[in-house]
Amino acid sequence: MSQKFAKNLLITGANRGIGLEFVKKLASRVDILFAGCRKPSEAKELNALKDAHNNLHVVEIDVTCEKNIQACIEEVSKVCGEAGLSCLINNAGANKKPDNKVTELSLDDLKRIFSVNTFGPPIVCKHSLSLLQQAAKTHSDQIITKPLIVNIGTGLSSVSRMNRDMSCYYSYNMSKSPLNMFTKMLSLEIEEDGIDVIAIHPGWVQTDMGGSNATLTVQQSIDMMLETLSNLRQEQNGTLINFKGETIPY
Ligand code: NDP
């Protein structure tokens, strides 16, 4: 078995795509894994995984609803106790059909996508922070990562790299750029607590969001992200990197 990745870990959007694959790869590498999704009773694959992994808890979390986030973190806190939460992966994300032109923007879609991609991670962090701080106090070197917040970002959030050849989804790309600022600010705020914060681009991945033409399978993406996250250097704290660990400029 590979070295333990984290003690206790929560991931959002775990019922399909990248989130589900993280759960498959991490279930045997953490003590307790909280797989968050909007509708646990309908999360067939996650519930099937519980048979093989009795450390897997499928928990309800809709990242657009603060009360729901709070209730989820209370549940996580009760199970983790003194150990706290050593890793949070903000993975849940939303997209829409291409809106390549400003005239194609829809206020309803913008609000929906920003609610998930822009506002979700900071509010999940707000409610999880005390559990991460608790974990930082009891961190052991036997575990591969320092207490860590992982924000699943995208290269499409990079203002300096944007050009017309890149996929121009106004709503999606705009919604992910603020995650970079949040990652940086939070990393500065909690550096002294011994908690790292990173935004990571998973590559173009074959999921419902990435589509079937994407260049990476979910297995390839998660294997490379886990390798990268296991070998983070302190100077990467607060930055946006890709699945190979290379810096993506904001
Ligand atoms: P999918 O569309 O396959 O999965 C999205 C996940 O997010 C689902 O589990 C979905 O749950 C969940 N989700 C959506 N809205 C909410 C919400 N309000 N609360 C909680 N969960 C929610 O996408 P991917 O797996 O491809 O994407 C995962 C992350 O990776 C996203 O943040 C995405 O932006 C990012 N990413 C993906 C890339 C790719 O090529 N695939 C490239 C770059 C970044 P439900 O089933 O309930 O809708």
Image (cartoon, helix red, strand yellow):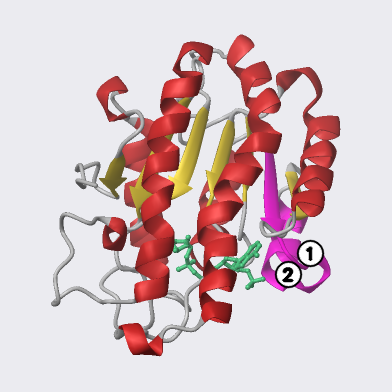
Q: CA distance from mark 1 to mark 2?
A: 5 Å
Residue at 36% across / 54% down in the picture?
Answer: 177
Does residue 47 belong to the magenta stretch? yes
Q: Which residues are magenta?
A: 31-52
Picture coordinates of residue 133, whole percent (x, y) = 63, 19
Look at the numbered discs 1 and 2 and tell me whether their residues touch, using CB distance below 8 Å. yes
Q: Can you say whether 123 is above or below 115 in the image?
A: above
Secondary element at tag 2: loop
For disc 1, the marked residue is 40
Q: Is residue 244 visible?
A: yes
Q: Amino acid at mark 2?
A: Ala
Q: Can you say whether 10 is above or below 5 in the image?
A: below
Picture coordinates of residue 211, whole percent (x, y) = 38, 81
Secondary element at tag 1: helix
Does residue 39 belong to the magenta stretch? yes
Residue at 73% across / 69% down in the picture?
Answer: 43
Q: Amino acid at mark 1?
A: Pro
Task: Name the image quarter holding residue 230.
Answer: top left
Residue placed most toward the observer, 229 or 198: 198
Q: Within 10 Å of the Cα at label 1, are there few (<14), some (14-19), or many (20+) other Cα atoms? A: some
Picture coordinates of residue 92, whole percent (x, y) = 56, 60
Residue at 58% across / 39% down in the picture?
Answer: 88
Picture coordinates of residue 145, whole percent (x, y) = 45, 26
